[in-house]
Image (tube, helix red, strand yellow):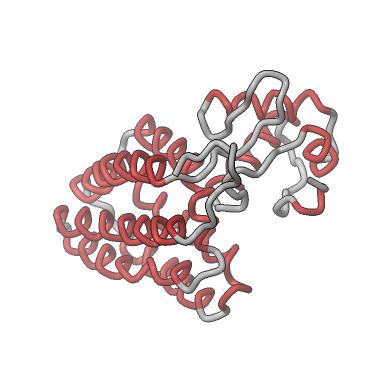
Amino acid sequence: MPASQFPSLRPRSSNSDLEHVYAELARSLMMAEFAPGQKLKLDDLATAFGTSHMPVREALNRLVMARALQAETRRTPFIPEASVERLRNLLTLRTDLEGKAVAMTVERGAAGLADQLAQINARMDAEAERGALGTRAYLQLNHKFHFSLYERCGNPELVNIIELLWMRYGPLLNLLKATPMSFSGHRHHAEIITAVRAGNVAGAVQNLVADLEEAGSAIATALSTQPQKPHGAKARI
């Protein structure tokens, strides 16, 4: 895949090449900027980042270990193919762990968090009105909304696990980028904000889970309308 077809990758600042490449690829995975089945070729990525092969290879190996990528011996790493089973398995973990993180955040008390979330949600509304032009910014704001909730839970290990799940789940969201559903899932955010402001643990968790499940249902619908793989291909759906 030509380097021009990769998402917009930010130039390295003070980080090492390895840390920068890994962070950018992880961010792009979480932001749904890679599609299921997409190959991540070493030469193309090295060109896109302006680095040697070594940091790119190491970053890809890390992502394979994190199960965000798949790789067979001497083959180009690729994004795992989308399947209903993969969706279901990841969504089960996300609703459980992200629900726990939200509950912990609300229980601890989060002064000023509701106002912060409301500001992010208002910006999401503005990007939604731009349609496809606002997709990238919208998804970035959605990530910021969720992790603003999770990072206040007091358990950085839990937040790290949630990040790993987002890296695996993000490419599934890529299936929704061309649909109106890409922008409708945050309607539960207002209810989450209300619950956070009131210290309502059950309400915050209920609406967080509803938010995740609504997007999951849309992904399942998108999967059901995809053409079947050619005969002889490994069908996973």
Q: Does 209 sit left or right of 118 as displayed?
A: left
> Based on the displayed image, in which of its 4 quarters is residue 71 positioned?
top right
Q: Does 86 sit left or right of 20 as displayed?
A: left
Which residue sits at x=28%, y=56%?
208
**Residue 50: image x %, image y %?**
85, 39
Quadrant of the image containing the C terminus = top left
Which residue sits at x=81%, y=27%?
53
For this orientation, the residue located farthest to the bottom is: 129
Quadrant of the image containing the N terminus = top right
Q: Does 61 sit left or right of 128 as displayed?
A: right
Q: Is residue 38 visible?
A: yes
Which residue sits at x=31%, y=63%?
114
Note whether 18 is above or below 33 in the view shown.
above
Note whether 183 is above or below 88 in the view shown.
below
Q: Is residue 152 visible?
A: no
Camera-nearest residue between 58 and 87:
87
Q: Does 46 sit left or right of 177 as displayed?
A: right
For this orientation, the residue located farthest to the top is: 73
Which residue sits at x=75%, y=41%?
13
Camera-nearest residue between 190 and 114:
190
**Residue 103: image x %, image y %?**
21, 47
Camera-nearest residue between 73 and 187:
73
> Based on the displayed image, in which of its 4 quarters is residue 64 positioned?
top right
**Residue 94: image x %, image y %?**
33, 43
> Based on the displayed image, in which of its 4 quarters is residue 97 positioned?
top left
Q: How many marks?
A: 0
Note whether 163 is above or below 66 in the view shown.
below
**Residue 125: image x %, image y %?**
46, 76
